[in-house]
Image (cartoon, rainbow, N blue to C red):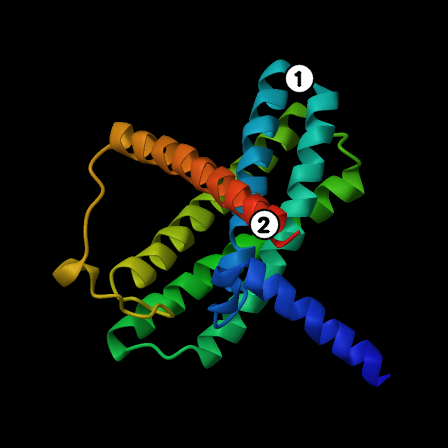
Amino acid sequence: MLGILESQTCAMNLILEFFPGLREMDNFHPLIVHFPIALLSCFLLLDGIAFLFNSRRLSQVASWFLWLGTVGALAAVAAGIQASLTVAHPDAVHSLLERHRNFGLNTASLAVVLSVWRLVSRGGFSRLGHFVHLLIALLMMINLLRGADLGGLMVYKYGVAVEAAGIRASGHAHRDMRGELQGWLHDLLHGQHEHGHTHEHDHHIHEHRY
């Protein structure tokens, strides 16, 4: 039993070493929340196209995005509520946090309604039913975007759950996309050159020892 626990601890340490950002997180809400945003957005887009072209097959594909997005939304809400109870935040942010929570709960609730509706109907919508379904999905997406916007506001303006780095006073700014790409190529080539040089140097040392 002790060996199993030690193996799990070792595995977790390796994971956290490979993902240093994950190690610094106070909670998993920022890690989870991007999945429902992407999945539910794809659902609305695909289902809208399916409605326009009356494509049952595409509507079935959209259903899977909805169901997976609903699971992600429920997980994100659960993690977000846990975060709101444990992450320190200033009084000025409390009302923003409550609104962010409410938009998240609205999104998850509407996603559940849409998911149950599609499961019960098995995708057999009338044109009017599909149109109403899309209107609810659009309302869900509005809540999702408003919640995401407030989440970004809390992080980027008020620094909730973020350690202050002081970059405005003493940091540096990146110039443009071209400069970023040039920097990436330079680091890539320079890193490979250094790796090759180090490997060659180690090889010479190995030969010298023998």
Mark 1, residues whose alpha carbon is within 10 Å: few (<14), some, or many (≥20)? Answer: some
Q: Earlier in the sequence, mark 1 or mark 2?
A: 1
Relative vertical location of residue 142 with respect to residue 52 in this rendering, above or below: below
42 and 155: which is toward the camera? 155
Residue 167: x, y in percent? 20, 60
At a point 56% along the width and 56% down the height, the residue shown is 32
Q: Residue at x 54, y 65 (%)?
A: 28
Question: Could you say where residue 187 lies in the image, as x and y percent from the top left?
Answer: 38, 38
Q: Image quadrant of residue 169?
A: bottom left
- Relative height, residue 114 to residue 98 (above, below): above
The reply, left or right, for residue 50 in relation to residue 171 is right
Mark 2 surroundings: few (<14), some (14-19) or many (≥20) residues within 10 A: few
- The front one of 13 and 32 is 13
* Residue for point 57% across, 55% down: 108
Label count reads 2
Q: Nearer the viewer, residue 172 or 28?
A: 172
| Cβ atoms at labels 1 and 2 below 8 Å apart | no
Tell which residue pokes out farthest to the right in this image: 1
Q: Which residue is mark 2?
A: 208
Please say whether residue 48 is visible from this viewpoint: yes
Relative to 13, residue 184 above or below: above
Query: x, y (%) of residue 124?
Result: 77, 30
Depth check, front residue: 111 or 121: 111
Going by the numbered disc 1, the residue's amino acid type is Asn
SS state under label 2 = helix
Residue receiving disc 1: 54
Q: Is residue 136 visible?
A: no
